[in-house]
Image (cartoon, grey):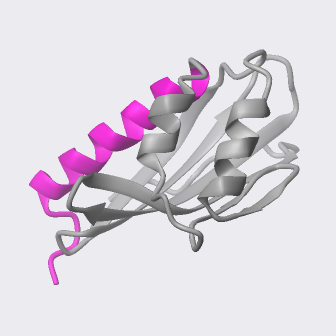
Amino acid sequence: MIIDDPEVRAEVEAAFAAYETALVGNDVETLERLFHDDPRTIRYGAGENLYGMDAIRAFRRARSPQGLARDLRDTVITTYGRDCAVAMTLFTRAGAPGRIGRQSQTWLRFPDGWKVVAAHVSIIEDDHGASGAPHP
């Protein structure tokens, strides 16, 4: 298995960037398109546990578009073979000083493109100016 094939990694980086743009812009249609439409898709959020695309869709459509801007740092995207990738990032929001968000996503390639099949978001205190490990 090839880890971090440059071509595959570029594809996932583009999908991740499209997700981030859609997230901060509250582009719900694009967010829904980037998640695998399946009852086994899971998104654990900072305040919710969503099982299946129907629950994820309902959450996205009901969420306020306010306060979504954020700054990413220490993003690490690793690909495994041609069809699997993991994206991990830290984020901060201007309205939440002293807090740091953590986001992980598992991406799989489907016939219609890269999709998130599992995601997890959590927020912790940033007591130590947390920084990620250097990217290889």
| Residue 41 shows in the view | yes
By secondary structure, the bulk of the magenta-drawn segment is best described as helix
Instruction: Pinpoint residue 74: horizontal percent, then vertical percent.
Output: 52, 44
Q: Residue at x 65, y 24 (%)?
A: 70
Instruction: Pinpoint residue 13: horizontal percent, then vertical percent.
Output: 30, 43
**In the visual, does 62 lie left or right of 76?**
right
Residue 10 falls within the magenta-colored stretch? yes
Instruction: Pinpoint residue 107: horizontal percent, then vertical percent.
Output: 40, 61
**In the visual, does 3 lie left or right of 114?**
left
Q: Quadrant of residue 127?
A: top right
Question: Quarter of the image containing the N terminus?
Answer: bottom left
Q: Is residue 70 above or below residue 112?
A: above
Q: Quadrant of residue 108?
A: bottom left
Q: How many marks?
A: 0
Q: Is residue 105 above or below residue 96?
A: below
Question: Quarter of the image containing the C terminus?
Answer: bottom left
Looking at this view, is 40 or 134 the one in front? 40
Looking at this view, is 54 or 130 the one in front? 54
Q: Residue at x 63, y 51 (%)?
A: 103
Residue 48 falls within the magenta-colored stretch? no
Q: Is residue 65 above or below residue 74?
A: above
**In the visual, does 109 lie left or right of 82?**
right
Instruction: Pinpoint residue 128: horizontal percent, then vertical percent.
Output: 81, 46
Q: Residue furthest bottom?
A: 1
| Residue 129 shows in the view | no
Q: Quadrant of residue 57?
A: top right
Looking at this view, is 12 or 112 the one in front? 112
The span picked out in magenta is 1-24
Q: Residue at x 15, y 76 (%)?
A: 2
